[in-house]
Image: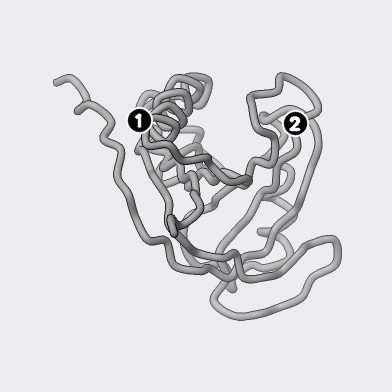
Amino acid sequence: MPEPESVIEEKQIEPILVAGFRMRGTYAEIGTGFSKIGSAMGFNIKGHALALFYDGEYKENDADFEACMPLKKMKEAKDLKVRELPGGRAFTLVHRGPYQDLRASYDKLRGHIKNLGLEPKRPSREIYVKGPGMIFKGNPEKYITEIQMFVELRE
């Protein structure tokens, strides 16, 4: 059965408490950040892993991104930045499939926002609803990633 077409939605995203580990490198290295957060925060983690992307476009190398995990409560940890990510008005798209296919979904979402006469704010977010597990890697065709791009409120 074919996957449903990805639908772009406008949402009001609530603020969220996270522990983050900011990195530079290739996107495939993000697992290192998630491991550091998992080791430091353990049972304080609450919800799906997410990532923040600070570059305005896709970068093969030297990308600027941050692995994040939502937290139940404030808990400081060495080498991690613990803070509340702001909420706000965002456009979202649920991407189904491998991470290497995310660019097309980003292009679609960015195009939609620009067609509305708006400008996406950085960083963009990815929420990993279903992805590789820590032990079993799973099937990349079944990964589910919600892309969130925040925009300025209109006056």
Residue that protrudes farthest toward the front in the picture: 155
Whether 128 is drawn above or below 72: the answer is: above
Question: Residue 19 occupies which quadrant of the picture?
Answer: bottom right
Whether 84 is drawn above or below 51: the answer is: below
Residue 31 visible at all: no
Question: Around disc 2, counting alpha carbons within 10 Å, would you say few (fewer than 14), some (14 to 19), or many (20 or more)?
Answer: some
Whether 7 is drawn above or below 45: the answer is: above
Question: Residue 32 occupies which quadrant of the picture?
Answer: top right
Q: Which mark is residue 128?
A: none
Image coordinates of residue 113 in percent, x first then y, are: 42, 36
Is residue 11 or residue 95 the one in the foreground? 11
Is residue 13 or residue 154 the one in the foreground? 154
Residue placed under numbered mark 1 in the picture: 96
Q: Amino acid at mark 1?
A: Arg
Whether 76 is drawn above or below 70: the answer is: below
| Element on which disc 1 rests | strand
Residue found 50% across the figure and 37% down from its top: 132
Residue found 34% across the figure and 55% down from its top: 11
Question: Around disc 1, counting alpha carbons within 10 Å, would you say few (fewer than 14), some (14 to 19), or many (20 or more)?
Answer: many
Is residue 142 or residue 64 the one in the foreground? 64
Q: Amino acid at mark 2?
A: Ala
Residue placed under numbered mark 2 in the picture: 63
The coloring applied to the image is: one colour
Image coordinates of residue 48 in percent, x first then y, are: 47, 55
Q: Earlier in the sequence, mark 1 or mark 2?
A: 2
